[in-house]
Image: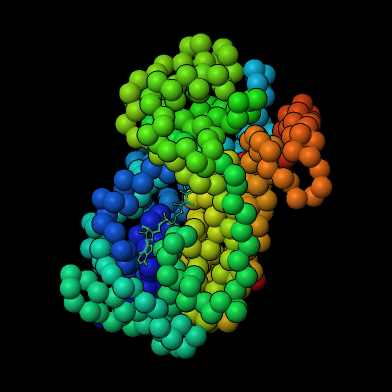
Amino acid sequence: MKTQVAIIGAGPSGLLLGQLLAKQGISNVILDRVSGDYVLGRIRAGILEQGFVDLVREAGVADRMDREGHVHEGVELSINNERFRIDLKELTGGNTVVCYGQVEITRDLMDARQAANLPTYYETEKVALHDVKSEQPYVTFIYQGEEYRMDCDYIAGCDGFHGVSRQTIPAELRTEHERVYPFGWLGLMADVPPCNHELIYAMSDRGFALASQRSLTRSRYYLQVPLTDKVEDWSDERFWDELKKRLPADVAATMQTGPSIEKSIAPLRSFVCEPMQYGNLFLVGDAAHIVPPTGAKGLNLAASDVATLYKIMQRVYKEGDKSCIEQYSEIALRRVWNGERFSWWMTNMMHDFGNEFTGDGMTPLMHKRFMQSELNYFLSSENGRKVIAEQYVGLPYEDLK
Ligand code: RFL
Ligand code: PHB
């Protein structure tokens, strides 16, 4: 088989890129190693930046998001019981974020792809990338017991952190930067109304908590937990008890609880692979970078990679200009590093690092005091809140040269 762009991975990056390319008449085939249902079972992000929303509209898949997504004009951060509202709209001159689940976006993109009859192969095995430095790269894989070869012009590696695409770049040509945090996030989904109309990122002496939501009737909450904890250690009752102790008291007092419909623990990591490109292979989204979820940046950084690659592909196929492909890694990485820095900073300020040695000679308690002081300063000053607001809504996408 033959296509112009082979896309590895049917997560949000791969599906969004595929939809945008197809709209421009650029052929693409998507491969994933798991089933569509499995992809939809992974509950992840909930906050979309304006850039992401615009891209979904451009892909023609925004109807349900525009109907059911909730625009959030602000976000709250709390230190123990003290609440600080960051007015995103006012502080950024009109920018907001949209609360709409990653699962829903993925479902909308999958449905649109199916309706347009665009080729997607789920449950493939042994996906391998070949000759990516040459003008004739190709991908081999096994589907329903048969071996296939797919010839293409370009390969988009949208296959997440554990995918094969990144490993295709020779180890001596890539630099991987990584920080694994000494705690995870335990997430719980429940069909109860959210405790607040906006998200609350809460720092407390007992550790971090996040009150998020999916709709007016579905809440998503997270607790910082030790990496050694297992989901089985956390009954629903224990989760709600602990959450109430970490959220501001007035919120906890009126919060509705109920049985969980999902509970899972995610490790926290900062990770960047440089470069994000090798010949005609481009890494997109989690395949190239991971952020801790504290800044809500993971999916949004994936979207800005997609936007950059989409512009490049349009120029290649519409204007016949192949030289622009060299710009991909540089443009994508500039925005990635910014999102990484913001996510790392938010994580540092809002979590309890316990007795972890900070590596620069200070005691853990001194580190904690610095972080508390930093958070206090940023939240108490309008300029500080402005800095957080500007980053939270997301920086503008960069154009090609
Ligand atoms: P994905 O979603 O991991 O999809 C990659 C796909 O590639 C497939 N694959 C392969 N296919 C073929 N061959 C192989 N060898 C393959 N190996 C893997 C996989 O099966 C999969 O289907 O990456 P993508 O598309 O780049 O999307 C990235 C986002 O999923 C991720 O950045 C966000 O979920 C991160 N994230 C958040 N991002 C935000 O912007 N805002 C948020 O509020 C937010 N909250 C979160 C999050 C991530 C979380 N977890 C669990 C990591 C909250 C959590 C708890
Ligand atoms: C979520 O709703 O899952 C969510 C929201 C904001 C974050 C992380 C996760 O920063």
Is residue 108 visible in this depiction of the protein? no
* Number of numbered discs: 0
Rendered residue at 66%/36% (across/down): 354
Please report the residue visible at 67 percent of the width from the left and 19 percent of the height from the top. Answer: 82
* Residue 71 sits above or below residue 127 on the image: above
Locate residue 95, reporting x and y percent.
60, 39
Give the image quarter of residue 20.
bottom left
Quadrant for the C terminus in the image: bottom right
Residue 226 figure quarter: top right
At horizontal 66% and vertical 61% (from top left) the residue drawn is: 334
In which image quadrant can residue 148 be found?
Answer: bottom left
Q: How is the image coloured?
A: rainbow
Q: Position of residue 218 (x, y in %)?
A: 37, 28
| Along the viewing direction, whichever of 188 and 10 lies nearer the viewer | 188
Q: Is residue 263 visible?
A: yes
Q: Is residue 84 above or below residue 385?
A: above
> Which residue is painted at 36% across and 77% down in the image?
128
- Left or right: where does residue 120 sit relative to residue 383? left
Q: Is residue 102 above or below residue 127?
A: above
| Residue 255 percent across, percent down from the top left | 46, 16
Quadrant (top left, top right, bottom left, bottom right) of the N terminus: bottom left
How far across and down, in percent of the image, does residue 49 sit?
54, 45
Q: Nearer the viewer, residue 205 or 22?
A: 205
Between 204 and 96, the residue placed more toward the observer is: 204
